[in-house]
Amino acid sequence: MKRLISTLAAAGLLSAAAATQAGEIVLGQLMDRTGPTANVGTNLGTGFNDYIKLINKGGGVEGHTLRVIEVDNQYKVPPSVEAYQRFKASGAVLVGLYGTPQTQALTADLHKDKIPGTSPGFGSAASADGESYPYLFPVAASYWSQAGGAIEFAKSELGGSLKGKKIAYLFYDNPAGREGLPVIRELSKIEGFTLQEFPVPAPGVEMSNQVRDISRRFRADFVVSHLFGRAPSVQLKEFNRAGFPLSKVVSFVWGASEADINAAGGFDKNVGYNGIQFAGVGDDFPIRQQIRDMYKAEGKSAPKEMDSTVFYNRGLLIGALHVEAVRNAVKSKGGSADINGTDVRDGFRAIKDFSLGGLLPPLNLSGGDHEGGGWVRVFTVTKDGFQAKTDWYKGYRDIVFKMIKEDAAKKKK
């Protein structure tokens, strides 16, 4: 009798599992694999897809398979808009965005269609205000939070006071590059430093004049840099050529990866350069070993993109947060795959103190803060690779979030 009950129970469980596995949840994902920021997108995209693959191999989300529809947007707006329509038609309950201009172009559609989108570390800082932007989630430090973190780091490096100091802001002259300006301008008034702005026209492969002006004419005490694509490596070469100490430079998140350093001559030639990050850098995280084990079980080597730990790890961050939001949504429906965008939005808002085994700061997306606190961490270049120079911190959080709320209110009108 006991064996019979056990058999029937097992059969019931198997039937339930078979029923849940029939459900499929669709995610849309934009990525740049062939455009000007392909050095980012190729590695980030592989990290994202590896995380989803790991989850599916482990039984999916509460027994449901995740299907990702990825589109290479080449860092262009028109393909992104077309891809979004494809995602929507395919029943996607969540869209991973890529690029600030692309995010700005799709924000209204996300809200109209009630489909949540993520813009990790890019897009408009105002979207961190969940009350004004209920369907857009930066899920990591926005450019405004990065700006606050960069100025706080400069302050620490310059002895605890910026009064009377000269800070240069070297930036890619497009909507993304200009996004951090309001915070830096406001902090220059509060902290009493002289700010000078140095825009770099696209594609960012020529900036000898800007670097010469920063080092010789302006004589900056510190440089805050916001460049991406090929531009960060060009910047490093120019600062080295000008003899400007790289220890006096801190980059936003898209300008300090292994590829940037190697393209500028390698780690031993760029010692001291500082980069803000919103995910951990390096290999010492359990999730990376789990992915290696997954490939080993398939008789394959781990992908070469894992060597680009800065961008690959960010792909893991995006994948993990997408899965966690979907998992929360499915649980709220009693385990059913019949979820919609609003369910996933609420799933994001249910994420609290999520750190993925130390890869992330303790992200908390509840309470209306859609960037999870604006956490950043600075890593410095050594001859042996990147080394953490700070712990996780929030730069001028009160000031930055007050500005975010004010800006969101203006844009809402």
Image: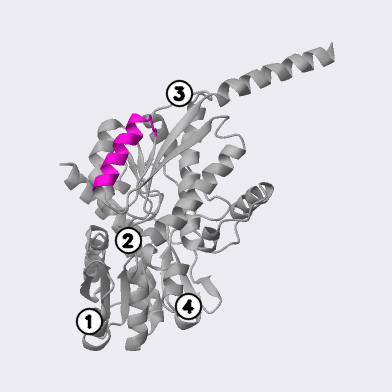
Name the residue: 35% across, 35% down.
87
- 172 in relation to 106, above or below: below
Structural distance between the alpha carbons of marks 1 and 4:
23 Å
Q: Residues within 10 Å of mark 3 (few under 14, many from 20)?
A: few
Q: Position of residue 156 (x, y in %)?
A: 40, 75
- Mark 4 or 2, nearer chain start: 2
Judged from the image, the secondary structure of the residue bearing numbered disc 4 is: loop
**As shown in the figure, which amino acid type bears the numbered disc 3?**
Asp
**258 sits left or right of 221 in the view:** right
* Alpha carbon separation for disc pair 3 and 1: 57 Å
Q: Are marks 2 and 1 in contact (CB under 8 Å)?
A: no
Residues drawn in magenta: 78-93
Query: In the image, residue 304 lies at what x, y percent?
Result: 55, 60
Badge 2 is on which residue? Answer: 36
Q: Secondary structure at mark 3?
A: loop
Q: Position of residue 245 (x, y in %)?
A: 38, 84
> Looking at the picture, which amino acid does disc 2 mark?
Pro
Classify 10 Å Cα crowding around label 1: few (below 14), some (14-19), many (20 and above). few
